[in-house]
Amino acid sequence: MRQTIVILHCMFEALRNVRGSNGLGYISMNPFILVREMATVDDEDEIEEALSQDEWAEVLITIEALPKDTSRDLAHYHRARWLFQLLYRAFLRRDEAAQLKMGNFIESADGWDLKFIGKGQKKARIVATTKLMGELRVYRLFHGLPAFPSPGEDRPALLSVNGKDQPVGDQLIYLICKEIFQATADRIETTKPASAAYLRKASPHWMRHTGITHSLEEGIDPRYVQAQARHASLSTTARYDHKERKRWREQLERV
C-alpha cells in the first residue's frame, strides 16, 4: 500500500509541476500529499544512525592517532582524515564520494560550491564550506598539489595511496570507515562500552546522517540543511532532528 501511495504521489507531483502552454500545471494540487502526511509507518521515526558529538570526537582522535612513520602511512592518514570530513561536511553517500573529481569543487563569487551527480542521477550543487575547503587544502598540499582545485581538474577527489591519479572505489571507502570505527570502538571499550558497541555497527552512510544531525543540533535553518542533504521534503530532514528528544529528557530530569 505504501509503495502504491508513493507511486501515485510521484505521478500527481509530476503533473502538478509540468507546465502547459498557459504556464499552469496540468493539476493545481497533489491529492496524495495528505495521504503521505497522515501515514504512520516505522521508517518515519527519527534517524538513529548518527554519532553523538562525543562519538564523533572519538573518531577524530582515532584518525589523528593513525601511524605516520612511512610515506604510505602518511598517505593513508591524510586520505582517512579527508574522507571522513568529506562525508561529514558535504553529507555525501560513499558512491558519490568515490565518483567525485577535484574539478567538482567550483569557486564562485560567494565561495566554493560542490557540483556533482547524486543519487538517482540527479544534478546537485551544494555549499563547500570554508572548513571543508580547509581540509581539502591540507590533503592537496600533502600530495604536492596546488592548494585548491583548478577548473575542470579531472583528478579524483580521493586518491589511492599508490598513485595520485588512481581513484578510490566505494568498497574501499567502506573498508576504511569500518577500520576507523572498529579501532575507535576497541580504544573506548572499557570507558564507553555503549558507544563502542554503537560504533561497531557504523558504516560510511552514518557520517552523512551525523553531519545532518549535528547541523540541526547547531540550529542551522532546516531549509538549508534540506538543500545541502538534497532531501525531497523538509519532513525527511526533520527525522534527523533530535533536539526535541533531548529537551524532553532535560525537562524530566528536573523532577
Image (cartoon, rainbow, N blue to C red):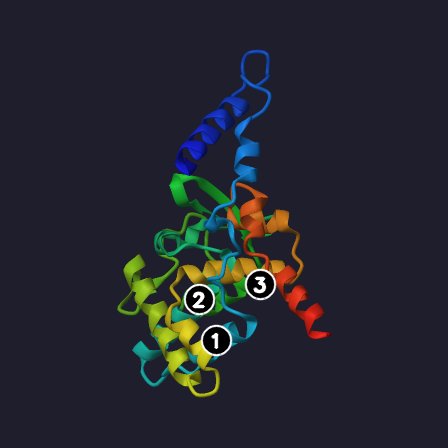
Check disc 1: other Cα within 10 Å, few if <14, some if 14-19, many if 20+: some
Front of the two marks 2 and 3: 3
Residue 209 position in % (x across, y down): 49, 59
Question: Compared with residue 203, is residue 127 higher up or lower down, i.e. above or below?
Answer: above
Residues at circles 2 and 3 in contact by the CB criterion of under 8 Å:
no
Can you identify the residue that label 1 sits on?
60
Can you identify the residue that label 3 sits on?
214
Q: Quadrant of the C terminus?
A: bottom right
Can you identify the residue that label 2 sits on?
84
C-alpha span from label 1 to label 3: 15 Å
- Secondary element under disc 1, as helix, strand or loop, is helix
Q: How many marks?
A: 3
Between 16 and 77, the residue placed more toward the observer is: 16
Check disc 3: other Cα within 10 Å, few if <14, some if 14-19, many if 20+: many
Of marks 1 and 2, which one's residue comes earlier in the chain? 1
- Secondary element under disc 2, as helix, strand or loop, is helix
Check disc 2: other Cα within 10 Å, few if <14, some if 14-19, many if 20+: many
Of marks 1 and 3, which one's residue comes earlier in the chain? 1
C-alpha span from label 1 to label 2: 9 Å
Amino acid type for the residue under numbered disc 1: Leu
Question: Compared with residue 250, is residue 229 higher up or lower down, i.e. above or below?
Answer: above
Front of the two marks 1 and 3: 3
Between 44 and 107, the residue placed more toward the observer is: 44
Residues at circles 1 and 2 in contact by the CB criterion of under 8 Å:
yes
Left-right relation of 201 to 125? left
Between 29 and 80, the residue placed more toward the observer is: 29
Amino acid type for the residue under numbered disc 3: His
Residue 61 position in % (x across, y down): 47, 80
Amino acid type for the residue under numbered disc 2: Phe
C-alpha span from label 2 to label 3: 14 Å
Question: Compared with residue 239, is residue 173 higher up or lower down, i.e. above or below?
Answer: below
